[in-house]
Image (cartoon, rainbow, N blue to C red):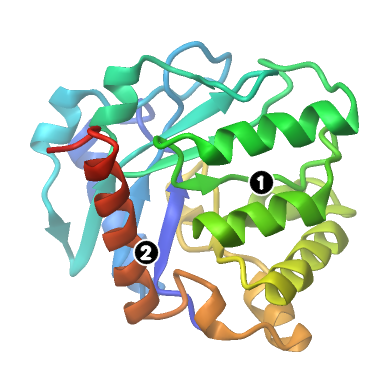
Amino acid sequence: MKLIADLHIHLAGTAPCAQIAGQIAEQAAQRGLILAALTDHLPKTSNIHCAWSPADQAVLPETQNGVRFLCGAEADISACGALIAPPQALAGAQLVVAAMHPYCVAPGSRLAHTEAFEAALKSSYTDILAHPMDAPYPFDEERIVALAARLGKPLELNALSERSDLQCRQAQQRLAQLAAQYGAPLVVSSDAQRPEQVGDFGAIPYWLDDLGIAQTLVVNAGASQLAAFLARVRARKREAGIWN
């Protein structure tokens, strides 16, 4: 499966903005990508990376080396499912990926995780549920996949998670098969922490093919579904009054 966009990248603060943008564009272009979303963490996180500021976003080019940039953010999901971030920061992001992290939320019960994911998915700010199959947070997978299908919000298959946890691949394969069953959209992301990781999706595109997962289900596996996904994001946020 050929992927054309990386929608989860962490690089802000590691070098001057223009330099990092150039490195991202160069790496993305080498890997045949047409779009890169910069989704560093919003405040209230122990992660070393923080979000791109409005000043950073103002100097970023729309495109470079044929690669289009989206200035987004990753928001932490609280124990109750709220996004831990100022509304104005969420509203300013072109793409919001939401995730649970141990430095913000201690693992709890399967039901608590399920309800938190459910609330986060229902948030008008959330565009992608990031790395839901990370080990600390078991949840009712069928319930969340069914909700993602109804809302049209992608569930992420995360390459960094697979590299960090050998058991994650099996969990993500199970999620992909459930998504295919329910028609829930998927997105494959690098979760890049260094420029050379941009567009590195590991083995995920290969095992998606092996499992027979339709390319049309993966929003960054084709220009038409990518454009349709981004159009849905814009329309939903305008309807919710987040964007004009």
Q: Identify the image quadrant of residue 206.
A: bottom right
Answer whether labels 2 and 1 touch (C-beta < 8 Å): no
Residue 1, visible in the rendered structure: no
Quadrant into which the C terminus falls: top left
- Residue type at the position of mark 1: His
Sequence-first tag of 2 and 1: 1
- 7 lies above or below 184: above
Tell me the distance, in whole angstroms, between the alpha carbons under discs 2 and 1: 19 Å
Residue 97, visible in the rendered structure: yes
Q: Position of residue 56 (x, y in %)?
A: 18, 29
Mark 2 Cα shell of 10 Å, populated few (<14), some (14-19), many (≥20): some
Q: Residue at x 57, y 33 (%)?
A: 120
Name the residue that disc number 2 marks. Answer: 229
Q: Residue at x 57, y 59 (%)?
A: 150
- Residue type at the position of mark 2: Phe
Q: Position of residue 85 (x, y in %)?
A: 43, 17
- 89 lies above or below 114: above
| Tag nearer the camera, 2 or 1 | 2
- 185 lies above or below 235: below
- Side of 130 where 138 appears, left or right: right
Front-lying residue, 65 or 225: 225
- 211 lies above or below 150: below
Please give the label number shown on residue 131: 1
- Side of 199 where 224 appears, left or right: left
